[in-house]
Image (spheres, grey):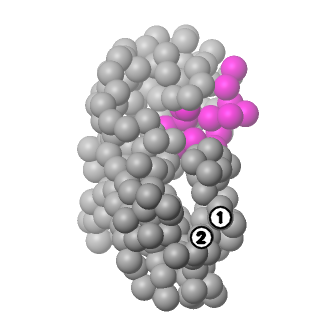
Amino acid sequence: MTEKIILASGSEIRAQLLQNAAIDFTIKTARVDEDAIKQSLMAEDASPRDIADALAEMKAQRVSAKHPEALVIGCDQVLALGRHIFNKPADPEEAFAQLKSLAGQKHQLLSAAVIYHDAKPVWRHVGVVRLLMREVSDAYLRDYVDRNWSSIRYAVGAYKLEEEGVRLFARIEGDYFNVLGLPLIELLSYLTLRGTLPS
């Protein structure tokens, strides 16, 4: 079976993960007002898991409407401290505040992926990673933000585990691909079982 695969995400890391796995795909970035959707769901007291899933589905649905013949992969990642959801920091001061609130705390990264085909969902998965940030001095956090701002400005929680951010952590439980924002193993398993990928 040869099916066209579209990644409905502008994330360079997600695209790189699929490329590294030798997946043939194209990219069509979904135009979705994530903040409005997130605020609406939070007002309804939706769980962080449901918010990640809904955002991923909205992206897949939007692109699938124009490309119903393709398998469209929508993705989203949410960082949650309890039921509080973090956004990308607007400036270095907000990055510092986010890191300060996470220091010494356990939080979760929820990486959702939804596949649409013929304008309807055919598969979904939310991968969960549990992280414990160590106690960190304010001085180190400020230096960390100053050194890494050009990179972490695009990261919820203001850290990247694939970079210096790994030094902030005492324990990480979960799949590294979920840390990067894509439940890759589960996605590949589905595509293989479906017959889209050779087994």
Q: Quadrant of residue 170?
A: top left
State the residue at coordinates (46%, 41%). 177
Q: Please give left or right for residue 51 compared with residue 142 in the image.
A: left
Q: Vertical placement of 30 versus 95: above or below?
A: below
Q: Quadrant of residue 33?
A: bottom right
State the residue at coordinates (44%, 58%). 199
State the residue at coordinates (30%, 31%). 173
- Numbered range of the magenta stretch: 147-160
Q: Secondary structure at mark 1?
A: loop
Q: Measured from the top left, where is residue 198 in percent x and y?
A: 49, 61
Is disc 1 in contact with disc 2, using a CB cutoff of under 8 Å? yes
Residue type indicated by callout 1: Phe
Q: CA distance from mark 1 to mark 2?
A: 5 Å
State the residue at coordinates (40%, 71%). 194
Task: Return the residue found at the far front.
Answer: 199
Q: Measured from the top left, where is residue 119 in percent x and y?
A: 49, 87
Q: What's the mark number on residue 164?
A: none
Q: Circle 1 sits on which residue?
A: 25
Q: Is residue 81 visible?
A: yes
Residue type indicated by callout 2: Ile
Q: Measured from the top left, where is residue 99 in percent x and y?
A: 47, 29
Q: Circle 2 sits on which residue?
A: 5
